Image (cartoon, coloured by chain):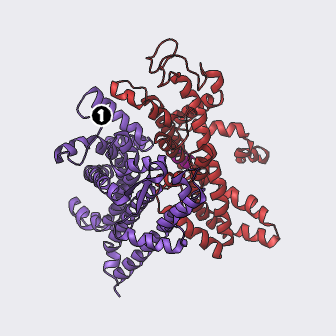
Amino acid sequence: MNTVSAPLRNIKARRTAYQSVVRTLKTAPISAWFGMIVILFYAICAIFAPLIAPYGQAEVIGKAYELSSARSWLGTDQIGRDLLSRMIYGARNTIGIALLTTSFSFVLGGSLGVLAALKRGWLDQGISRVVDAFLAIPVLIFALMLLAVAGRSITNLILILALLDSTRVFRLSRAVALNVVVMDFVESARLRGEGMRWIVFKEIVPNILPPLITEFGLRFCFVFLTISALSFLGVGIQPPTADWGSMVAENKSLITFGRAAPLYPAAAIALLTVAVNFVVDWFLQKTGGLPDDI
Amino acid sequence: MHPVLRTVLQRLGLGILTLLAVSVIIFSALAMLPGGYAQNILGQGATPETVAAFNKELGLDRSAVVRYFEWIGNVLQGDFGYSYSGLSGTIKRSVSAIIAPRLYNTFFLAVMAASIAVPLSLFLGVMAALYRNSWFDRIVNSVTLTTIAMPEFFIAYVLMFFLAVKLRWFFPLSTVSADTPFFEHLFRALLPALTMTLVIIAHMMRMTRAAIINLLASPYIEMAQLKGVSKSQVIVHHALPNAWAPIAVVIAFSLAYLVVGVVVVEVVFVYPGIGQMMVDAVSSRDMPVVQACALVFAATYILLNLLADIVSIITNPRLLHPK
Protein backbone atom coordinates (compact mmCIF):
# COMPACT_ATOMS: atom_id res chain seq x y z
CA MET A 1 0.00 0.00 0.00
CA ASN A 2 2.70 2.41 1.02
CA THR A 3 4.76 1.69 -2.06
CA VAL A 4 1.88 2.78 -4.29
CA SER A 5 0.93 6.02 -2.57
CA ALA A 6 4.41 7.43 -2.08
CA PRO A 7 5.15 8.31 -5.72
CA LEU A 8 1.58 9.63 -6.10
CA ARG A 9 2.09 12.14 -3.33
CA ASN A 10 5.36 13.24 -4.78
CA ILE A 11 3.75 14.04 -8.10
CA LYS A 12 5.64 17.23 -8.80
CA ALA A 13 9.05 15.59 -8.55
CA ARG A 14 8.22 13.14 -11.33
CA ARG A 15 7.78 15.87 -13.91
CA THR A 16 10.75 16.81 -15.98
CA ALA A 17 11.49 20.45 -16.72
CA TYR A 18 10.09 19.98 -20.23
CA GLN A 19 6.83 18.55 -18.90
CA SER A 20 6.29 21.37 -16.43
CA VAL A 21 6.95 23.96 -19.14
CA VAL A 22 4.34 22.26 -21.35
CA ARG A 23 1.89 22.13 -18.42
CA THR A 24 2.37 25.83 -17.68
CA LEU A 25 2.00 26.76 -21.35
CA LYS A 26 -1.27 24.81 -21.57
CA THR A 27 -2.81 27.06 -18.94
CA ALA A 28 -1.72 30.26 -20.72
CA PRO A 29 -4.60 32.48 -21.86
CA ILE A 30 -5.03 33.43 -25.52
CA SER A 31 -3.55 36.90 -25.00
CA ALA A 32 -0.35 35.38 -23.61
CA TRP A 33 -0.16 32.93 -26.52
CA PHE A 34 -0.61 35.78 -28.94
CA GLY A 35 2.17 37.69 -27.17
CA MET A 36 4.56 34.76 -27.20
CA ILE A 37 4.00 34.00 -30.88
CA VAL A 38 4.57 37.65 -31.81
CA ILE A 39 7.76 37.79 -29.73
CA LEU A 40 9.00 34.57 -31.34
CA PHE A 41 8.29 35.99 -34.79
CA TYR A 42 10.24 39.16 -33.99
CA ALA A 43 13.10 37.12 -32.55
CA ILE A 44 13.35 35.04 -35.74
CA CYS A 45 13.31 38.21 -37.87
CA ALA A 46 16.00 39.79 -35.70
CA ILE A 47 18.32 36.78 -35.56
CA PHE A 48 18.06 35.72 -39.21
CA ALA A 49 17.68 39.22 -40.69
CA PRO A 50 20.41 38.83 -43.36
CA LEU A 51 18.83 35.55 -44.55
CA ILE A 52 15.23 36.75 -44.61
CA ALA A 53 15.64 40.27 -45.95
CA PRO A 54 15.54 40.45 -49.76
CA TYR A 55 18.02 43.38 -49.84
CA GLY A 56 20.68 44.89 -47.58
CA GLN A 57 19.72 47.59 -45.05
CA ALA A 58 21.62 50.36 -46.88
CA GLU A 59 21.16 49.00 -50.40
CA VAL A 60 19.56 51.41 -52.88
CA ILE A 61 17.32 49.37 -55.18
CA GLY A 62 15.34 51.95 -57.10
CA LYS A 63 13.90 55.44 -57.12
CA ALA A 64 12.75 57.23 -53.99
CA TYR A 65 9.23 56.61 -52.61
CA GLU A 66 8.31 53.84 -55.05
CA LEU A 67 4.94 52.21 -54.50
CA SER A 68 4.76 48.58 -53.46
CA SER A 69 5.49 46.12 -56.26
CA ALA A 70 6.50 42.50 -56.74
CA ARG A 71 10.13 43.58 -56.46
CA SER A 72 9.68 45.51 -53.25
CA TRP A 73 6.58 44.56 -51.26
CA LEU A 74 6.31 47.69 -49.15
CA GLY A 75 7.86 50.15 -51.60
CA THR A 76 11.02 52.18 -51.14
CA ASP A 77 12.02 54.97 -48.76
CA GLN A 78 13.29 58.51 -49.33
CA ILE A 79 16.52 57.43 -51.04
CA GLY A 80 15.21 54.30 -52.72
CA ARG A 81 15.99 51.60 -50.16
CA ASP A 82 13.62 48.64 -49.76
CA LEU A 83 11.26 49.30 -46.83
CA LEU A 84 10.62 45.62 -46.06
CA SER A 85 14.34 44.84 -45.81
CA ARG A 86 14.84 47.84 -43.56
CA MET A 87 11.93 46.73 -41.38
CA ILE A 88 13.56 43.31 -40.94
CA TYR A 89 16.98 44.76 -40.18
CA GLY A 90 15.25 47.28 -37.94
CA ALA A 91 14.03 44.41 -35.76
CA ARG A 92 17.62 43.39 -35.21
CA ASN A 93 18.93 46.90 -34.51
CA THR A 94 16.09 48.38 -32.48
CA ILE A 95 15.35 45.31 -30.35
CA GLY A 96 19.05 44.52 -29.95
CA ILE A 97 19.89 47.99 -28.69
CA ALA A 98 16.88 48.05 -26.36
CA LEU A 99 17.80 44.62 -24.94
CA LEU A 100 21.40 45.65 -24.42
CA THR A 101 20.32 48.86 -22.66
CA THR A 102 17.86 47.05 -20.40
CA SER A 103 20.49 44.45 -19.49
CA PHE A 104 23.01 47.15 -18.59
CA SER A 105 20.39 48.93 -16.56
CA PHE A 106 19.54 45.72 -14.66
CA VAL A 107 23.17 44.87 -13.96
CA LEU A 108 23.82 48.38 -12.65
CA GLY A 109 20.53 49.02 -10.85
CA GLY A 110 20.18 45.46 -9.58
CA SER A 111 23.64 45.19 -8.06
CA LEU A 112 23.41 48.64 -6.47
CA GLY A 113 19.94 47.81 -5.13
CA VAL A 114 21.04 44.53 -3.54
CA LEU A 115 24.18 46.18 -2.20
CA ALA A 116 22.17 49.04 -0.65
CA ALA A 117 19.76 46.57 0.94
CA LEU A 118 22.62 44.50 2.37
CA LYS A 119 24.84 47.30 3.64
CA ARG A 120 22.16 49.86 4.65
CA GLY A 121 23.59 52.93 6.43
CA TRP A 122 25.18 55.84 4.60
CA LEU A 123 25.69 53.91 1.35
CA ASP A 124 21.98 53.15 1.07
CA GLN A 125 21.07 56.72 2.07
CA GLY A 126 23.52 58.23 -0.38
CA ILE A 127 22.42 56.19 -3.40
CA SER A 128 18.74 56.53 -2.55
CA ARG A 129 18.88 60.33 -2.37
CA VAL A 130 20.74 60.60 -5.69
CA VAL A 131 18.19 58.24 -7.25
CA ASP A 132 15.33 60.36 -5.85
CA ALA A 133 16.75 63.44 -7.58
CA PHE A 134 17.11 61.50 -10.85
CA LEU A 135 13.55 60.18 -10.62
CA ALA A 136 12.24 63.75 -10.38
CA ILE A 137 13.13 64.44 -14.02
CA PRO A 138 11.17 62.67 -16.80
CA VAL A 139 13.42 60.16 -18.60
CA LEU A 140 12.80 61.50 -22.11
CA ILE A 141 13.66 65.07 -21.08
CA PHE A 142 16.73 63.97 -19.12
CA ALA A 143 17.90 61.76 -22.00
CA LEU A 144 17.45 64.62 -24.49
CA MET A 145 19.56 66.91 -22.31
CA LEU A 146 22.32 64.35 -21.77
CA LEU A 147 22.40 63.50 -25.48
CA ALA A 148 22.88 67.21 -26.22
CA VAL A 149 25.82 67.20 -23.82
CA ALA A 150 27.46 63.94 -24.84
CA GLY A 151 26.68 64.09 -28.55
CA ARG A 152 24.57 61.72 -30.62
CA SER A 153 25.90 58.19 -30.94
CA ILE A 154 24.61 54.69 -30.28
CA THR A 155 27.10 54.14 -27.45
CA ASN A 156 26.03 57.34 -25.72
CA LEU A 157 22.38 56.45 -26.22
CA ILE A 158 22.82 53.02 -24.62
CA LEU A 159 24.88 54.33 -21.70
CA ILE A 160 22.60 57.29 -20.96
CA LEU A 161 19.36 55.30 -21.08
CA ALA A 162 20.88 52.45 -19.06
CA LEU A 163 21.97 54.95 -16.41
CA LEU A 164 18.58 56.68 -16.27
CA ASP A 165 16.61 53.46 -16.28
CA SER A 166 18.81 51.83 -13.64
CA THR A 167 17.37 54.28 -11.09
CA ARG A 168 13.98 52.57 -11.50
CA VAL A 169 15.55 49.12 -11.27
CA PHE A 170 17.46 50.21 -8.18
CA ARG A 171 14.23 51.20 -6.43
CA LEU A 172 12.58 47.86 -7.12
CA SER A 173 15.54 45.57 -6.42
CA ARG A 174 16.33 47.46 -3.20
CA ALA A 175 12.71 47.13 -2.04
CA VAL A 176 12.44 43.39 -2.74
CA ALA A 177 15.96 42.66 -1.46
CA LEU A 178 15.17 44.48 1.81
CA ASN A 179 12.37 41.98 2.42
CA VAL A 180 14.69 39.03 1.82
CA VAL A 181 17.72 40.32 3.74
CA VAL A 182 15.86 40.11 7.06
CA MET A 183 14.88 36.44 6.53
CA ASP A 184 16.19 33.75 8.83
CA PHE A 185 17.98 31.81 6.10
CA VAL A 186 20.11 34.85 5.26
CA GLU A 187 20.91 35.30 8.94
CA SER A 188 21.88 31.64 9.30
CA ALA A 189 24.06 31.83 6.19
CA ARG A 190 25.81 34.79 7.77
CA LEU A 191 26.28 32.93 11.05
CA ARG A 192 27.54 29.93 9.13
CA GLY A 193 30.31 32.23 7.94
CA GLU A 194 29.36 32.32 4.27
CA GLY A 195 31.01 35.02 2.22
CA MET A 196 29.33 38.00 0.61
CA ARG A 197 29.22 36.31 -2.80
CA TRP A 198 27.39 33.26 -1.44
CA ILE A 199 24.84 35.37 0.41
CA VAL A 200 24.10 37.48 -2.64
CA PHE A 201 24.00 34.77 -5.31
CA LYS A 202 22.76 31.74 -3.37
CA GLU A 203 20.43 33.34 -0.84
CA ILE A 204 19.15 36.70 -2.11
CA VAL A 205 19.16 36.61 -5.92
CA PRO A 206 17.07 33.42 -6.33
CA ASN A 207 14.42 34.94 -4.06
CA ILE A 208 14.16 38.32 -5.79
CA LEU A 209 14.27 36.91 -9.33
CA PRO A 210 10.53 36.52 -10.13
CA PRO A 211 9.60 40.19 -9.57
CA LEU A 212 12.80 41.27 -11.34
CA ILE A 213 11.99 39.15 -14.41
CA THR A 214 8.55 40.73 -14.66
CA GLU A 215 10.12 44.12 -14.22
CA PHE A 216 12.59 43.29 -16.98
CA GLY A 217 9.71 42.87 -19.41
CA LEU A 218 8.14 46.19 -18.39
CA ARG A 219 11.45 48.07 -18.39
CA PHE A 220 12.27 46.60 -21.80
CA CYS A 221 9.01 48.02 -23.16
CA PHE A 222 9.75 51.39 -21.63
CA VAL A 223 13.35 51.51 -22.89
CA PHE A 224 12.25 50.29 -26.32
CA LEU A 225 9.59 53.01 -26.55
CA THR A 226 12.01 55.68 -25.31
CA ILE A 227 14.69 54.66 -27.82
CA SER A 228 12.11 54.66 -30.60
CA ALA A 229 10.88 58.10 -29.52
CA LEU A 230 14.44 59.47 -29.40
CA SER A 231 15.24 57.96 -32.80
CA PHE A 232 12.01 59.38 -34.16
CA LEU A 233 13.06 62.79 -32.84
CA GLY A 234 16.35 62.36 -34.70
CA VAL A 235 18.64 62.17 -31.67
CA GLY A 236 18.70 58.41 -31.12
CA ILE A 237 19.94 55.74 -33.52
CA GLN A 238 21.52 57.51 -36.48
CA PRO A 239 21.23 56.71 -40.21
CA PRO A 240 22.11 54.66 -42.20
CA THR A 241 21.37 52.08 -39.47
CA ALA A 242 17.86 50.75 -40.09
CA ASP A 243 15.72 51.49 -37.06
CA TRP A 244 11.96 51.69 -36.72
CA GLY A 245 11.82 55.01 -34.91
CA SER A 246 13.99 56.84 -37.44
CA MET A 247 12.22 55.07 -40.31
CA VAL A 248 8.96 56.69 -39.19
CA ALA A 249 10.67 60.09 -39.20
CA GLU A 250 12.35 59.50 -42.60
CA ASN A 251 9.08 58.61 -44.34
CA LYS A 252 6.73 60.90 -42.43
CA SER A 253 6.12 63.24 -45.37
CA LEU A 254 4.42 60.36 -47.23
CA ILE A 255 1.48 60.44 -44.86
CA THR A 256 0.18 63.75 -46.18
CA PHE A 257 0.00 62.09 -49.62
CA GLY A 258 -2.23 59.39 -48.21
CA ARG A 259 0.37 56.62 -48.08
CA ALA A 260 0.64 54.47 -44.98
CA ALA A 261 4.39 53.78 -45.26
CA PRO A 262 5.42 55.48 -41.98
CA LEU A 263 2.71 53.54 -40.17
CA TYR A 264 4.41 50.15 -40.77
CA PRO A 265 7.50 50.68 -38.59
CA ALA A 266 5.35 52.48 -35.99
CA ALA A 267 2.94 49.53 -35.99
CA ALA A 268 5.88 47.14 -35.63
CA ILE A 269 6.90 49.00 -32.47
CA ALA A 270 3.34 49.05 -31.11
CA LEU A 271 2.78 45.34 -31.80
CA LEU A 272 5.93 44.28 -29.97
CA THR A 273 5.20 46.37 -26.86
CA VAL A 274 1.61 45.13 -26.77
CA ALA A 275 2.85 41.53 -27.08
CA VAL A 276 5.41 41.91 -24.30
CA ASN A 277 2.76 43.51 -22.11
CA PHE A 278 0.39 40.58 -22.65
CA VAL A 279 3.08 38.09 -21.64
CA VAL A 280 4.11 40.17 -18.62
CA ASP A 281 0.47 40.43 -17.59
CA TRP A 282 0.16 36.65 -17.59
CA PHE A 283 3.45 36.34 -15.69
CA LEU A 284 2.17 38.78 -13.08
CA GLN A 285 -0.95 36.72 -12.57
CA LYS A 286 1.10 33.54 -12.20
CA THR A 287 3.64 34.91 -9.76
CA GLY A 288 1.14 36.90 -7.70
CA GLY A 289 1.96 40.44 -8.76
CA LEU A 290 4.65 42.94 -8.00
CA PRO A 291 5.20 44.00 -4.42
CA ASP A 292 3.29 47.17 -3.56
CA ASP A 293 6.12 48.96 -1.81
CA ILE A 294 8.20 50.06 -4.77
CA MET B 1 0.76 72.74 14.97
CA HIS B 2 -2.12 71.17 13.11
CA PRO B 3 -0.99 67.82 11.68
CA VAL B 4 -2.26 68.74 8.20
CA LEU B 5 -0.24 71.95 8.13
CA ARG B 6 2.86 70.16 9.39
CA THR B 7 2.65 67.44 6.75
CA VAL B 8 2.00 70.00 4.02
CA LEU B 9 5.01 72.06 5.10
CA GLN B 10 7.19 68.94 5.20
CA ARG B 11 6.10 68.00 1.70
CA LEU B 12 6.69 71.57 0.46
CA GLY B 13 10.19 71.56 1.92
CA LEU B 14 10.93 68.25 0.22
CA GLY B 15 9.60 69.61 -3.06
CA ILE B 16 11.84 72.69 -2.87
CA LEU B 17 14.84 70.49 -2.06
CA THR B 18 14.05 68.30 -5.08
CA LEU B 19 13.77 71.37 -7.30
CA LEU B 20 17.17 72.58 -6.07
CA ALA B 21 18.79 69.19 -6.65
CA VAL B 22 17.32 68.99 -10.14
CA SER B 23 18.48 72.52 -10.98
CA VAL B 24 22.01 71.58 -9.88
CA ILE B 25 21.91 68.51 -12.16
CA ILE B 26 20.67 70.58 -15.11
CA PHE B 27 23.20 73.32 -14.44
CA SER B 28 26.11 70.92 -14.28
CA ALA B 29 25.15 69.51 -17.69
CA LEU B 30 26.79 72.56 -19.25
CA ALA B 31 29.98 72.03 -17.28
CA MET B 32 30.19 68.42 -18.50
CA LEU B 33 30.21 69.49 -22.15
CA PRO B 34 33.26 67.84 -23.71
CA GLY B 35 35.77 70.50 -24.77
CA GLY B 36 33.93 73.23 -22.89
CA TYR B 37 31.10 75.52 -23.86
CA ALA B 38 33.25 78.18 -25.56
CA GLN B 39 34.95 75.62 -27.81
CA ASN B 40 31.54 74.30 -28.83
CA ILE B 41 30.26 77.72 -29.83
CA LEU B 42 33.39 79.07 -31.45
CA GLY B 43 34.35 75.87 -33.23
CA GLN B 44 37.50 73.77 -33.29
CA GLY B 45 39.56 76.49 -34.96
CA ALA B 46 39.23 79.01 -32.14
CA THR B 47 42.51 80.24 -30.67
CA PRO B 48 43.01 79.99 -26.89
CA GLU B 49 42.84 83.82 -26.74
CA THR B 50 39.37 84.00 -28.32
CA VAL B 51 38.17 81.18 -26.07
CA ALA B 52 39.46 83.04 -23.01
CA ALA B 53 37.88 86.29 -24.18
CA PHE B 54 34.54 84.54 -24.79
CA ASN B 55 34.67 82.91 -21.37
CA LYS B 56 35.43 86.27 -19.78
CA GLU B 57 32.55 87.97 -21.59
CA LEU B 58 30.09 85.32 -20.35
CA GLY B 59 31.67 85.14 -16.92
CA LEU B 60 32.55 81.46 -17.44
CA ASP B 61 36.00 82.04 -15.92
CA ARG B 62 34.48 82.34 -12.46
CA SER B 63 33.85 79.38 -10.16
CA ALA B 64 30.92 77.06 -10.84
CA VAL B 65 29.28 77.83 -7.48
CA VAL B 66 29.14 81.57 -8.17
CA ARG B 67 27.76 80.93 -11.66
CA TYR B 68 25.14 78.52 -10.35
CA PHE B 69 23.72 81.04 -7.89
CA GLU B 70 23.77 83.78 -10.51
CA TRP B 71 22.01 81.46 -12.98
CA ILE B 72 19.36 80.27 -10.56
CA GLY B 73 18.79 83.87 -9.37
CA ASN B 74 18.23 85.02 -12.94
CA VAL B 75 15.98 82.04 -13.68
CA LEU B 76 13.79 82.91 -10.71
CA GLN B 77 13.36 86.36 -12.27
CA GLY B 78 12.46 84.78 -15.61
CA ASP B 79 15.82 85.37 -17.30
CA PHE B 80 17.33 82.24 -18.84
CA GLY B 81 20.44 83.91 -20.25
CA TYR B 82 21.46 84.08 -23.90
CA SER B 83 21.75 81.60 -26.71
CA TYR B 84 24.73 81.92 -29.05
CA SER B 85 24.32 80.51 -32.51
CA GLY B 86 25.57 81.12 -36.01
CA LEU B 87 29.18 81.24 -37.07
CA SER B 88 31.48 81.73 -34.03
CA GLY B 89 28.47 82.54 -31.85
CA THR B 90 27.78 85.87 -33.56
CA ILE B 91 23.98 85.63 -33.16
CA LYS B 92 23.04 86.38 -29.55
CA ARG B 93 19.39 85.88 -28.56
CA SER B 94 17.63 86.06 -25.23
CA VAL B 95 16.44 82.55 -24.34
CA SER B 96 13.44 83.86 -22.41
CA ALA B 97 12.26 85.79 -25.46
CA ILE B 98 12.43 82.66 -27.68
CA ILE B 99 10.81 80.44 -25.10
CA ALA B 100 7.87 82.63 -24.02
CA PRO B 101 5.61 82.23 -27.11
CA ARG B 102 6.48 78.52 -27.34
CA LEU B 103 5.61 78.03 -23.68
CA TYR B 104 2.22 79.64 -24.27
CA ASN B 105 1.52 77.27 -27.20
CA THR B 106 2.48 74.19 -25.21
CA PHE B 107 0.44 75.35 -22.26
CA PHE B 108 -2.51 75.89 -24.61
CA LEU B 109 -2.17 72.35 -25.98
CA ALA B 110 -1.72 70.76 -22.56
CA VAL B 111 -4.75 72.54 -21.11
CA MET B 112 -6.83 71.44 -24.10
CA ALA B 113 -5.74 67.82 -23.78
CA ALA B 114 -6.25 67.82 -20.02
CA SER B 115 -9.72 69.36 -20.20
CA ILE B 116 -10.85 66.61 -22.58
CA ALA B 117 -8.95 63.74 -20.94
CA VAL B 118 -9.52 64.34 -17.22
CA PRO B 119 -13.35 64.36 -17.10
CA LEU B 120 -13.64 61.63 -19.72
CA SER B 121 -11.24 59.22 -18.04
CA LEU B 122 -12.63 59.85 -14.55
CA PHE B 123 -16.11 59.12 -15.89
CA LEU B 124 -14.96 55.97 -17.72
CA GLY B 125 -12.91 54.80 -14.75
CA VAL B 126 -15.73 55.23 -12.25
CA MET B 127 -18.22 53.55 -14.59
CA ALA B 128 -15.84 50.63 -15.19
CA ALA B 129 -15.37 50.24 -11.44
CA LEU B 130 -19.09 50.45 -10.62
CA TYR B 131 -20.08 48.01 -13.37
CA ARG B 132 -17.15 45.73 -12.81
CA ASN B 133 -16.71 42.67 -15.04
CA SER B 134 -19.54 43.80 -17.29
CA TRP B 135 -19.02 43.90 -21.06
CA PHE B 136 -18.40 47.64 -20.80
CA ASP B 137 -15.63 47.08 -18.27
CA ARG B 138 -14.04 44.36 -20.38
CA ILE B 139 -14.04 46.38 -23.60
CA VAL B 140 -12.66 49.50 -21.95
CA ASN B 141 -10.01 47.42 -20.19
CA SER B 142 -8.69 45.63 -23.24
CA VAL B 143 -8.72 48.79 -25.34
CA THR B 144 -6.76 50.73 -22.71
CA LEU B 145 -4.29 47.87 -22.17
CA THR B 146 -3.52 48.04 -25.88
CA THR B 147 -3.24 51.82 -26.22
CA ILE B 148 -1.09 52.04 -23.08
CA ALA B 149 1.67 50.08 -24.80
CA MET B 150 1.71 52.05 -28.04
CA PRO B 151 4.22 54.76 -28.83
CA GLU B 152 2.77 58.29 -29.03
CA PHE B 153 3.86 58.78 -32.61
CA PHE B 154 2.01 55.67 -33.75
CA ILE B 155 -1.29 56.94 -32.32
CA ALA B 156 -0.51 60.40 -33.72
CA TYR B 157 0.15 59.15 -37.25
CA VAL B 158 -2.84 56.81 -37.24
CA LEU B 159 -5.11 59.71 -36.27
CA MET B 160 -3.44 61.98 -38.78
CA PHE B 161 -3.70 59.38 -41.54
CA PHE B 162 -7.38 58.60 -41.05
CA LEU B 163 -8.89 61.80 -39.65
CA ALA B 164 -6.83 64.41 -41.47
CA VAL B 165 -5.60 62.81 -44.71
CA LYS B 166 -8.37 60.34 -45.55
CA LEU B 167 -11.44 61.99 -44.06
CA ARG B 168 -10.11 65.57 -44.21
CA TRP B 169 -11.80 66.61 -40.96
CA PHE B 170 -8.67 68.25 -39.60
CA PHE B 171 -5.47 69.86 -40.86
CA PRO B 172 -2.69 67.27 -40.92
CA LEU B 173 -0.16 69.77 -39.59
CA SER B 174 -0.82 72.16 -36.71
CA THR B 175 1.21 75.15 -37.77
CA VAL B 176 0.13 78.17 -35.75
CA SER B 177 1.78 81.54 -35.26
CA ALA B 178 1.37 84.41 -32.82
CA ASP B 179 -1.33 86.05 -34.95
CA THR B 180 -3.46 82.93 -35.48
CA PRO B 181 -6.98 83.76 -34.23
CA PHE B 182 -7.98 82.00 -31.01
CA PHE B 183 -10.59 79.68 -32.52
CA GLU B 184 -8.40 78.69 -35.42
CA HIS B 185 -5.63 77.94 -32.92
CA LEU B 186 -8.12 75.83 -31.01
CA PHE B 187 -9.13 73.92 -34.14
CA ARG B 188 -5.59 73.42 -35.37
CA ALA B 189 -4.48 72.13 -31.97
CA LEU B 190 -7.42 69.73 -31.73
CA LEU B 191 -5.75 66.75 -33.41
CA PRO B 192 -2.59 66.86 -31.25
CA ALA B 193 -4.81 67.35 -28.21
CA LEU B 194 -6.86 64.28 -29.19
CA THR B 195 -3.66 62.26 -29.59
CA MET B 196 -2.48 63.18 -26.13
CA THR B 197 -5.93 62.48 -24.74
CA LEU B 198 -5.77 58.95 -26.13
CA VAL B 199 -2.28 58.48 -24.72
CA ILE B 200 -3.10 59.54 -21.16
CA ILE B 201 -6.69 58.40 -20.93
CA ALA B 202 -5.63 54.76 -20.69
CA HIS B 203 -3.38 55.36 -17.67
CA MET B 204 -5.85 57.63 -15.96
CA MET B 205 -8.86 55.43 -16.52
CA ARG B 206 -7.09 52.31 -15.25
CA MET B 207 -5.76 54.07 -12.18
CA THR B 208 -9.18 55.55 -11.39
CA ARG B 209 -10.81 52.15 -11.81
CA ALA B 210 -8.26 50.48 -9.51
CA ALA B 211 -8.60 53.22 -6.89
CA ILE B 212 -12.40 53.06 -6.84
CA ILE B 213 -12.48 49.25 -6.72
CA ASN B 214 -10.00 49.31 -3.87
CA LEU B 215 -12.14 51.84 -2.06
CA LEU B 216 -15.45 50.03 -2.59
CA ALA B 217 -13.90 46.87 -1.14
CA SER B 218 -13.14 48.53 2.20
CA PRO B 219 -15.17 47.36 5.21
CA TYR B 220 -16.75 50.73 6.02
CA ILE B 221 -18.38 50.89 2.57
CA GLU B 222 -19.79 47.39 3.08
CA MET B 223 -21.03 48.53 6.50
CA ALA B 224 -22.82 51.49 4.91
CA GLN B 225 -24.40 49.23 2.29
CA LEU B 226 -25.46 46.71 4.92
CA LYS B 227 -27.16 49.31 7.06
CA GLY B 228 -29.28 50.26 4.04
CA VAL B 229 -27.79 53.54 2.81
CA SER B 230 -28.79 54.20 -0.78
CA LYS B 231 -26.26 53.62 -3.53
CA SER B 232 -25.80 57.31 -4.40
CA GLN B 233 -25.43 58.20 -0.72
CA VAL B 234 -22.73 55.56 -0.31
CA ILE B 235 -20.78 57.03 -3.19
CA VAL B 236 -21.20 60.73 -2.37
CA HIS B 237 -20.95 60.61 1.44
CA HIS B 238 -18.80 57.62 2.16
CA ALA B 239 -16.65 56.83 -0.84
CA LEU B 240 -15.95 60.27 -2.30
CA PRO B 241 -14.14 61.88 0.70
CA ASN B 242 -11.59 59.08 0.59
CA ALA B 243 -11.46 59.07 -3.19
CA TRP B 244 -10.12 62.62 -3.64
CA ALA B 245 -6.58 61.59 -2.82
CA PRO B 246 -6.28 58.79 -5.40
CA ILE B 247 -8.09 60.91 -7.99
CA ALA B 248 -5.70 63.83 -7.40
CA VAL B 249 -2.77 61.46 -7.78
CA VAL B 250 -4.23 60.08 -10.99
CA ILE B 251 -4.77 63.54 -12.49
CA ALA B 252 -1.33 64.81 -11.53
CA PHE B 253 0.29 61.63 -12.77
CA SER B 254 -1.29 61.92 -16.18
CA LEU B 255 -0.61 65.64 -16.44
CA ALA B 256 3.01 64.89 -15.64
CA TYR B 257 2.86 62.25 -18.35
CA LEU B 258 1.56 64.94 -20.71
CA VAL B 259 4.78 66.85 -20.11
CA VAL B 260 6.72 64.03 -21.75
CA GLY B 261 4.18 63.11 -24.41
CA VAL B 262 3.98 66.68 -25.61
CA VAL B 263 7.54 66.52 -26.99
CA VAL B 264 6.80 63.75 -29.48
CA VAL B 265 3.30 64.95 -30.36
CA GLU B 266 4.51 68.48 -31.09
CA VAL B 267 7.18 67.14 -33.43
CA VAL B 268 4.67 64.92 -35.26
CA PHE B 269 2.19 67.74 -35.86
CA VAL B 270 4.89 70.42 -36.32
CA TYR B 271 3.22 72.37 -33.53
CA PRO B 272 5.46 75.26 -32.42
CA GLY B 273 5.71 74.40 -28.74
CA ILE B 274 8.50 74.09 -26.24
CA GLY B 275 8.95 70.35 -26.86
CA GLN B 276 9.76 70.83 -30.52
CA MET B 277 12.05 73.65 -29.54
CA MET B 278 13.95 71.42 -27.12
CA VAL B 279 14.44 68.74 -29.79
CA ASP B 280 15.77 71.36 -32.23
CA ALA B 281 18.09 72.73 -29.55
CA VAL B 282 19.38 69.23 -28.77
CA SER B 283 20.13 68.64 -32.46
CA SER B 284 22.09 71.89 -32.74
CA ARG B 285 23.54 71.52 -29.21
CA ASP B 286 22.26 74.95 -28.20
CA MET B 287 22.90 74.35 -24.51
CA PRO B 288 21.25 77.41 -22.87
CA VAL B 289 17.97 76.60 -24.65
CA VAL B 290 18.26 72.89 -23.77
CA GLN B 291 18.86 73.79 -20.13
CA ALA B 292 15.95 76.21 -20.04
CA CYS B 293 13.56 73.69 -21.63
CA ALA B 294 14.76 70.87 -19.36
CA LEU B 295 14.29 73.09 -16.33
CA VAL B 296 10.78 74.11 -17.40
CA PHE B 297 9.76 70.49 -18.03
CA ALA B 298 11.33 69.16 -14.83
CA ALA B 299 9.88 71.95 -12.71
CA THR B 300 6.39 71.39 -14.13
CA TYR B 301 6.71 67.67 -13.46
CA ILE B 302 7.87 68.19 -9.87
CA LEU B 303 5.28 70.88 -9.11
CA LEU B 304 2.45 68.70 -10.45
CA ASN B 305 3.52 65.80 -8.26
CA LEU B 306 3.88 68.17 -5.31
CA LEU B 307 0.39 69.53 -5.93
CA ALA B 308 -1.09 66.03 -6.03
CA ASP B 309 0.58 65.13 -2.75
CA ILE B 310 -0.67 68.28 -1.09
CA VAL B 311 -4.23 67.73 -2.35
CA SER B 312 -4.17 64.18 -1.04
CA ILE B 313 -2.85 65.38 2.32
CA ILE B 314 -5.43 68.11 2.83
CA THR B 315 -8.36 65.96 1.70
CA ASN B 316 -7.36 63.01 3.87
CA PRO B 317 -10.24 62.60 6.36
CA ARG B 318 -7.97 60.83 8.84
CA LEU B 319 -5.63 63.81 9.03
CA LEU B 320 -8.46 66.37 9.01
CA HIS B 321 -10.14 64.97 12.10
CA PRO B 322 -7.33 63.84 14.40
CA LYS B 323 -8.36 61.91 17.47
- Report whether residue A294 is seen: no
Q: Which chain is purple?
A: B
Above or below, B47 against A188 in this view is above
Chain ID at mark 1:
B
Secondary structure, magenta segment, majority class:
helix
At label 1, which amino acid type do we have? Pro
The answer to whether residue A79 is left or right of residue B47 is: left
Comparing A16 with B89, the one in front is B89
Location of the C terminus of chain B by quadrant is: bottom left
Picture quadrant where residue B75 is located? bottom left
Location of the N terminus of chain B by quadrant is: bottom left
Which residue is tagged 1? B172
The answer to whether residue A30 is left or right of residue B158 is: right
The answer to whether residue B177 is left or right of residue B157 is: left
Farthest right residue?
A193
> Secondary structure beneath disc 1?
loop
Comparing B9 with A290, the one in front is B9
Q: Which chain is red?
A: A
Comparing A109 with B119, the one in front is A109
Picture quadrant where residue B52 is located? bottom right
Q: Which residues are magenta?
A: A217-222
Residue B123 location, x and y as percent? 26, 51
- Report whether residue A18 is seen: yes
Residue B138 location, x and y as percent? 36, 42
Q: Residues within 10 Å of mark 1 (few under 14, many from 20)?
A: many
Above or below, A125 against B214 in this view is below
Q: Residue at coordinates 34% horizontally, 82% vertically from top-left? A: B322
Residue A189 location, x and y as percent? 77, 68
Comparing A52 with A281, the one in front is A52
